[in-house]
Amino acid sequence: MGGLFRRLSFTLFVLVVLASGMHGPQAKQKSGEDPPLKIGFLMDSLKVERWQTDLDAFQKRAKELGAEVLVETAEGDDALQFEQAYKLLNSGIKALVIVAHDTNEAVRIVASARAKNVPVLSYDRLIRNSNIDFFVGADGQAIGELQASALVKLAPGGNYMLIGGSPTDLTAKLLRAGQMKILKPLIDRGDIKILADVWARDWKPVEAYTHTIEMIEASGGNITAIVASDDGTAGGAIQALQDHNLAGKVLVSGQDADLAAIIRILDGTQTMTVYKPVGSEARQAAETAVSLAKGESIRSSTFIPNGNRNVPAFFVTPVVVTKDNVMQTVIKDGFQNLDTIQKSLPPEKWPK
């Protein structure tokens, strides 16, 4: 019995040693690794080209900084966006980035995040009257000024139509304020007449199409320019113009430098767009979100009032894009692909 007991004890000892040798170091390595920093990203929609570009650049930069991005997209549903926020806030995120569908409704999301001590970065669309920690985007009013100025330069008089974005989006209102800053003196002088001042719910091109059809019929097609607030609404308006053989005869503005818009500009049916260096904007947002998640202090010399306080901000510089500088702007930056553009147009319309 004594020998058998000693053999069993030795066997048990060997098994314990082998087990500790196999699992001990691995367990130690795993416990020594810090879990990735989780950042929540609430998107309004990914159906618009530019938002997918933003997300790709944001995720890439966040990953480089050791962060994991948890993404939710609401596709224009405020109730769903709130539910998604609740889900993210209970998943262990350390910072929340929001592209709000309705900037007024998003105030609830910010309050929920603050209740859990999760800092909030408002991305591209400023959430007013809330305790957000940072804003990254462009100056909407400045973009509106660029849009109107580009059209007024070509047509300082005539019948103008204004197509704004979503009436629930503060950015759409800022764009309109910038547009009117340029147009109002000419309106007051009687040089420009506003035929219609309308809004496109959820920035939908079909809304812009419908409004433009109505105005074409009401004015007999006597429209000089359409101040469209983004490339989606510009596309809807231009489709309506094409249906009435007016495309290329009416000036049309835009924003975002979408591929379809760049092709329309080179084809002569859209006058201009405003390019915001989205890659730079998204990377800055990712870096800021990671810093917020780590509890680091962020210095900023730029601020934007949101009705509650002056919020630290980072602004990208918008650039006017016309057929004359496509190569020097969106293609040079790699934002759009030259081969793709060339495949969509005859050689005589390729950018130079």
Image (tube, grey):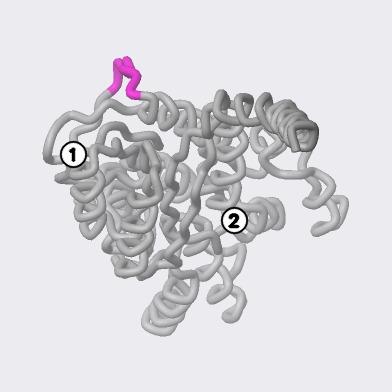
Predominant secondary structure, magenta span? loop
Q: Is residue 286 left or right of residue 199?
A: right
Image coordinates of residue 2 in percent, x first then y, are 74, 32
Q: Is residue 56 magenta?
A: no
Image coordinates of residue 185 in percent, x first then y, are 23, 45
Task: Kindly identify the residue that appears in the image at 58 percent across and 52 percent down.
Answer: 52
Label 2 crowd bin: few (<14), some (14–19), many (20+), radius 10 Å: some
Q: Nearer the viewer, residue 59 or 241?
A: 59
Nearer to us: label 1 or label 2 = 1
What secondary structure is marked by label 1?
loop
> Mark 1 sits on what residue?
131
Image coordinates of residue 48 in percent, x first then y, are 54, 59
> Mark 2 sits on what residue?
49
Q: Nearer the viewer, residue 93 or 124?
A: 93
Amino acid found under the numbered disc labelled 2: Glu
Q: Work out whether residue 22 can be spotted.
A: no
Label 1 crowd bin: few (<14), some (14–19), many (20+), radius 10 Å: many
Residue reaching furthest to the left: 308
What secondary structure is marked by label 2?
helix
Q: Over which residues does the magenta segment extend?
A: 295-302
Quarter-of-image position of residue 54 = top right
Amino acid found under the numbered disc labelled 1: Asn
Q: Mark 1 to mark 2: distance in Å?
A: 30 Å
Task: Kindly identify the residue that appears in the image at 47 percent across and 43 percent down.
Answer: 150
